[in-house]
Every structure is written in structure tokens, then in C-alpha cells.
Image: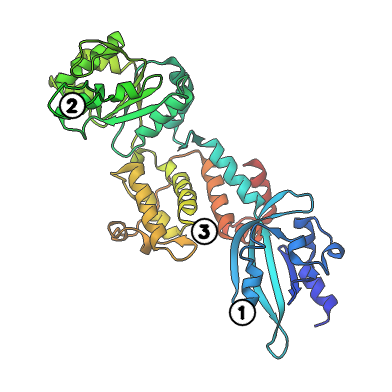
């Protein structure tokens, strides 16, 4: 086919396309490539590809060089380029070889798609629903987001209540980092994980000679937290004998290490958390009522994940991004079948369980998506059922669907619009409103 006809065809393609010879000099450059990179065809042709298509892998592991070397195609590799004005642009790249009639490799071809729109949508959604590493679009959680800065600056005791795995420690972290004590230490202790005989010394420390093995002074958690914040996790498991001593710390801001007759100041903000109903423990005589009211100046109740199904898609995106960085993978999402299972699961282990499920999927998935077969066996056994759409704002749900479909088609709006059953111009209008 004559070269002018090939150029005409390439200019009709929405993706950027350029070809190179075996020396990696550009031999053709279509209109979309001009639009995305900012370089004209005249400026590009004859130049080395790394001078025009400037990526962060050009001199590390160039996909085009890899294709020419191995003869294999590379598809949908996400990376960034610098355009003519040195602006960073996220793109999805695919490469393959060019051969002559005899099958000899004479160069390569690279196609690339501008992902700026998708990345911008991702960023807007994350910023809208993220607060100090906590992601949620749930109404109750967002109400907590609204009051958290004021709660943090007040320095009063806060009781964080929620089932195991709901993220109580994240909220405690947020309170500390938003407070005037943010430059001080943030010390955590699980009151249910340490034997009663050792817990007092862990909390308040001890002096040399306080008991047989006390060879030297040891600082307790309250001493380590001076000027900062202490989180007493699983406060409902605190023994009655220590409840009295903790009450004194709250009332007088002082404590005594084991073996000491001198009180020490406790310049510490006290946060506590529990997955047990403290009111019932008070009624049963297992938890002091006066201590309960001292700890419960402000209560933050975190709903379980089964009551905020609208958070599932955004949490999936959050953990996928986290594990992509951790495992150096490029997982783009979960398949429709896997999403159906994840949307309908009750999550007795809450957000922590979801994180473990997705980490399991990352380990087993060899492709770009986590499928049903990559989920833990107890989830694979669940029978297929109709997806129950989470109760969220319709516009938010539509934005999430549009984002996922565009992502699925690597930014190709024509294909995305076809799958959504709307015209391309309608899709553009919806994107502008998101």
C-alpha cells in the first residue's frame, strides 16, 4: 500500500501511532501522536524515538526495544511521557514489530493512548472520598470526617467504637495527626493482648527493684507518650484493678510507676477503642461507670462494612493501588464476576478482611484483573446472585460505573460509550459533569 494511504489511515486513528526503523529513528508519526506529544510530524520524523516520545523507561526497559528484540507484542503498559512543554502525561502503550515481505524485522510500531482523563477522574474521586488515609463515601463516615478536625484539636478523651477490622486505629491516627500533639509520639497498646500481671508495668513502667527481675528502670507507655497521644485498644478488656489507676490518670493527669512513691505527670491525650459494648459491661459490673464516662467524652461509632456497601468499589480501588505499589504489579481492577461476589459478601472481618481478600487475589492473578478464581476458596463457593446495587447517590454510582468502563477500555471513549449504551457525545457531556 502506498505510504500516503498508510498515513491517511493512521491519521484517522484516535490513538497516537509512530513507527521506527532498526536504529529507533522515527519513520512515521500520526496526527493523534502530534496532539498528545505536542511535536509535529516534521519535528518527529528522523529523530530518535526517545527524543520525542520521552518516557520514564526509555533507558531502563524500553517496551519498543523489547518487542524488536524478542519479536513479541507488549500491550497496555501504563507509563508517563513528557510532552513538548515538559508536562507529564499518563499513557497506555502497546508495541509490536514491523516486518518486510520476507519476514525480516525492519523496525517497530508503538501505539499510545492518553490516560489523562481517567487519571483525573481517579484523582477527583479519591480526593472527594479520602480523609487522612481513610476512604469512604458512606454518609455516617463522612459525618465523622466533618467533626474529626474539631475533635482532634479539643484534647478531650475519645472513645472509638466498632467491630474488629473496621479501622478504629486509622481514626485514632487521624485524630493524633490533626491535633496540636501531632509532633509528639503516638503510642498504642492492646489491653487484651497482654497478661494482667504484666499490663500494669507496660502501662505505667517500673522502678529498679520493684520486683525480682526489675534490674533497672523501665518506662511505661504513658511515659513514652509524653507530649503526644496514647491509644488504649480493646479497653473493654482492661482488668478492674487497673481501671482504678487509669481513672486516676484521667482525673489528676498523674500516675505512679511500679515500685515508686513519687507521682509523675501524664501530659498525654488518651484515646480508647473497643469492639465490645461498654454499656453492657458497666451494667454487668465488669467496667467502672465513672471510668466509662471519663473515656466517653466524645464517642465515634464506626459502622461495619456490611452497612456501607457503597464503600466497596472505592475500597477495592484503594487496595489495588496500595498492592500495585507494594508488589510492583499493574493490576487494573476486578472482573464483573469478582465484583459481584465482593459486593454481596457480608464481610464479618470488615475492611481488614477485604484487604486480605484483595492481597490473596494479587498473589494469584497473573493478568491485569482479579477474577473469581483468584479469590479465597470460601468466596469462590458462593453461588452467583443478582448484584444488589449499594444505596448511594445515583450520580456518584454513575460516575463510578463510567470511570470503570473507560478504564476497562484503556481510555477509548468510543468503546466505552458503546458498552454503556450511549452516544460518544453523551459520554463527553457526562464526563464534564463528574
Residue 206 higher or lower than 337, as above or below:
above
Asked if residue 288 can be seen in this view, the reply is no
Determine which quarter of the picture holds residue 202.
top left
Q: CA distance from mark 2 to mark 3?
A: 52 Å
Question: Can you give x and y, in whole percent of width and height, for residue 128 in the image?
Answer: 55, 36
Question: On residue 264, which mark appears?
Answer: none
**Residue tagged 2:** 214
Disc 3 crowd rating (10 Å Cα; few below 14, some 14-19, many 20+) is some
Residue 192 higher or lower than 92, as above or below:
above
Q: Nearer the viewer, mark 2 or mark 3?
A: 2
Q: CA distance from mark 1 to mark 3?
A: 22 Å
Q: Are marks 1 and 2 in contact (CB under 8 Å)?
A: no
Q: Residue furthest front?
A: 215
Question: On residue 330, which mark appears?
Answer: 3
**Residue tagged 1:** 71
Question: Can you give x and y, in whole percent of width and height, for residue 147 in the image?
Answer: 46, 22
Name the N-terminal-most of marks 1 and 3: 1
Q: Are marks 2 and 3 in contact (CB under 8 Å)?
A: no
Residue 272 higher or lower than 133, as above or below:
above
Q: Nearer the viewer, mark 1 or mark 2?
A: 2
Determine which quarter of the picture holds residue 7.
bottom right
Image quadrant occupied by the C terminus: top right
Q: Are marks 1 and 3 in contact (CB under 8 Å)?
A: no
Q: Is residue 51 left or right of residue 296?
A: right
Amino acid at each position: 500500500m502506498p505510504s500516503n494511504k498508510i498515513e491517511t489511515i493512521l491519521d484517522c486513528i484516535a490513538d497516537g501511532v509512530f513507527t521506527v526503523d532498526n536504529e529507533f529513528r522515527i519513520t512515521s508519526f500520526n496526527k493523534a501522536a502530534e496532539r498528545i506529544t505536542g511535536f509535529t510530524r516534521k519535528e518527529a520524523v528522523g529523530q530518535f524515538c526517545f527524543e520525542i516520545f520521552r518516557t520514564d523507561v526509555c533507558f531502563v526497559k524500553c517496551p519498543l526495544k523489547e518487542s524488536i528484540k524478542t519479536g513479541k507484542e507488549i500491550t497496555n503498559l501504563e507509563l508517563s511521557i513528557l510532552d513538548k512543554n515538559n508536562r507529564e502525561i499518563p499513557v497506555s502503550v502497546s508495541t509490536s514489530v514491523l516486518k518486510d515481505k520476507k519476514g525480516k524485522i525492519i523496525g517497530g510500531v508503538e501505539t499510545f493512548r492518553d490516560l489523562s482523563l481517567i487519571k483525573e477522574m481517579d484523582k477527583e474521586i479519591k480526593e472527594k472520598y479520602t480523609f487522612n488515609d481513610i476512604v469512604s463515601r458512606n454518609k455516617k463516615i463522612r459525618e465523622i470526617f466533618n467533626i474529626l478536625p474539631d475533635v482532634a484539636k479539643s484534647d478531650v478523651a475519645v472513645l472509638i467504637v466498632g467491630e474488629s477490622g473496621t479501622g478504629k486505629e486509622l481514626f485514632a491516627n487521624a485524630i493524633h495527626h490533626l491535633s496540636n500533639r501531632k509532633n509528639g509520639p503516638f503510642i498504642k497498646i492492646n489491653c487484651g493482648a497482654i497478661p494482667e500481671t504484666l499490663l500494669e508495668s507496660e502501662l505505667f513502667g517500673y522502678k529498679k527493684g520493684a520486683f525480682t527481675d526489675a534490674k533497672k528502670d523501665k518506662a511505661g507507655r504513658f511515659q513514652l507518650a509524653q507530649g503526644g497521644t496514647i491509644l488504649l485498644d480493646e479497653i473493654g478488656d482492661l482488668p478492674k484493678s487497673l481501671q482504678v489507676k487509669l481513672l486516676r490518670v484521667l482525673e489528676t493527669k498523674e500516675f505512679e510507676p511500679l515500685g515508686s512513691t513519687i507521682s509523675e505527670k501524664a501530659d498525654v491525650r488518651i484515646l480508647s477503642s473497643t469492639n465490645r459494648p461498654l454499656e453492657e459491661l458497666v451494667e454487668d459490673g465488669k467496667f467502672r461507670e465513672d471510668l466509662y464516662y471519663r473515656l466517653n467524652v466524645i464517642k465515634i461509632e464506626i459502622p461495619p462494612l456490611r452497612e456501607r456497601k457503597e464503600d466497596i468499589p472505592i475500597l477495592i480501588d484503594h487496595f489495588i493501588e496500595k498492592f500495585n505499589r507494594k508488589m510492583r504489579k499493574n493490576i487494573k481492577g476486578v472482573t464483573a464476576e469478582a465484583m459481584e461476589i465482593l459486593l454481596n459478601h457480608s464481610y464479618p472481618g470488615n475492611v481488614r478482611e477485604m484487604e486480605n481478600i484483595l492481597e490473596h487475589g494479587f498473589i494469584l492473578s497473573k493478568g491485569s484483573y482479579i477474577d473469581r478464581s483468584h479469590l479465597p476458596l470460601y468466596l469462590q463457593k458462593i453461588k452467583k446472585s443478582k448484584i444488589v446495587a449499594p444505596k448511594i447517590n445515583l450520580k456518584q454510582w454513575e460516575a463510578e460505573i463510567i470511570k470503570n468502563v473507560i478504564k476497562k477500555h484503556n481510555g477509548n471513549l468510543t468503546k466505552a460509550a458503546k458498552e454503556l449504551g450511549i452516544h460518544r457525545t453523551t459520554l463527553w457531556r457526562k464526563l464534564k459533569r463528574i
